[in-house]
Amino acid sequence: MESRRLGRSGLSISAIAYGNWLTHGGQVEEDAAHACVRAALDAGITTFDTADVYAGTRAESVLGRALAGQRREGLEVFTKVYWPTGPGHNDRGLGRKHVIESCHASLRRLQTDYVDLYQAHRYDPTVPLEETMTAFADLVRAGKVLYIGVSEWRADEIAAGAELARDLGIQLISNQPQYSMLWRVIEDEVVPTSEKQGISQIVWSPLAQGVLTGKYQPGQQPPSGSRAAHEEAGGSIRRFLRDDVLTRVQQLRPVADDLGLSMAQLAVAWVLQNQNVAAAIIGASRPEQVQDNVAAAGVTLEPAILARIDEVLGDVVERDPAKTARG
């Protein structure tokens, strides 16, 4: 497994990270979740990403149990804070009370004394940025968090956060955005700003919620048991289920075949060609999905292949920076 440095920090992570959004504590039973984590470990994945809000906090607990007994120093465990985790008015956002309390709760669920990366799951315009970053800095100094990251922040927000972090003597080293062949909204503004600030991308949904595997056919209903057919998970995939998008995706199959790659491997390899991407987060409901995706690590796509992909996808690619996800 290839490893990459995260931002300008001394932290190395696996180029393929394992994430448990929509799976652990939700779509798959715990035995299956543990099997996927074991497959990830066997494949050389050392980086595991979760969040307090996933499956109503259950995902962190499942991951904590799945990683129990592993050598902690050999893992990089990431989690996030922002979305509601309870009914109270302080059970959400990036105010000091919620940040500190959520971190403590995440550590209990994950069965660890610290997390390697603690991420602001969205930008919170209702709380002074100084308050949020000071809370993060206090967690770093307490040894409960090693590094700080953000998720789906815009370029100006990333720049402001990085400046404040430096003033406080801590390191903001990552952003976690959606990024795939079909969703490139970070390229024009977020990536250049991040490179200037010494921040890497840890990208989620490199398969565009599974659309880039080619399993969804234009003019047809989603296969039974697929993510698009799942009542809860299906909402996030809708933007990619247009016939014009699905038709173009099917035209990527000869590209993958020519390279001896699966469609999923091509999609994961594509995001890893961006030098600002430190890791691609994969999810899985079956161990064989992990094994397939991991084979994309270390694959080099020549410029002619990247140009061919751009030609195939054409104008179905979304590039508008304004579509960075908001809270």
Image (cartoon, rainbow, N blue to C red):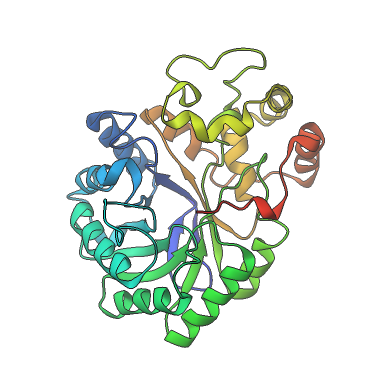
Q: Nearer the viewer, residue 290 or 200?
A: 200
**Residue 174 locus on image (x, y percent):** 50, 64
**Residue 299 locus on image (x, y percent):** 61, 43
Q: How many marks?
A: 0
**Residue 211 locus on image (x, y percent):** 59, 29
* The image quarter in which residue 243 lies: top right
- Residue 192 vs residue 225: left or right? right
Q: Residue at x 57, y 69 (%)?
A: 158
Q: Is residue 72 above or below residue 160?
A: above
Q: Residue at x 55, y 40 (%)?
A: 296
Q: Going by the picture, which residue comes out furthest to the front? A: 89
Q: Is residue 253 above or below residue 164?
A: above
Answer whether residue 261 is visible to the viewer in this image: no
Q: Residue at x 65, y 46 (%)?
A: 300
Q: Nearer the viewer, residue 78 or 70?
A: 78
* The image quarter in which residue 58 lies: top left
- Residue 23 vs residue 244: left or right? left
Q: Residue at x 63, y 66 (%)?
A: 155
Q: Is residue 115 above or below residue 17?
A: below
Answer whether residue 7 is visible to the viewer in this image: yes
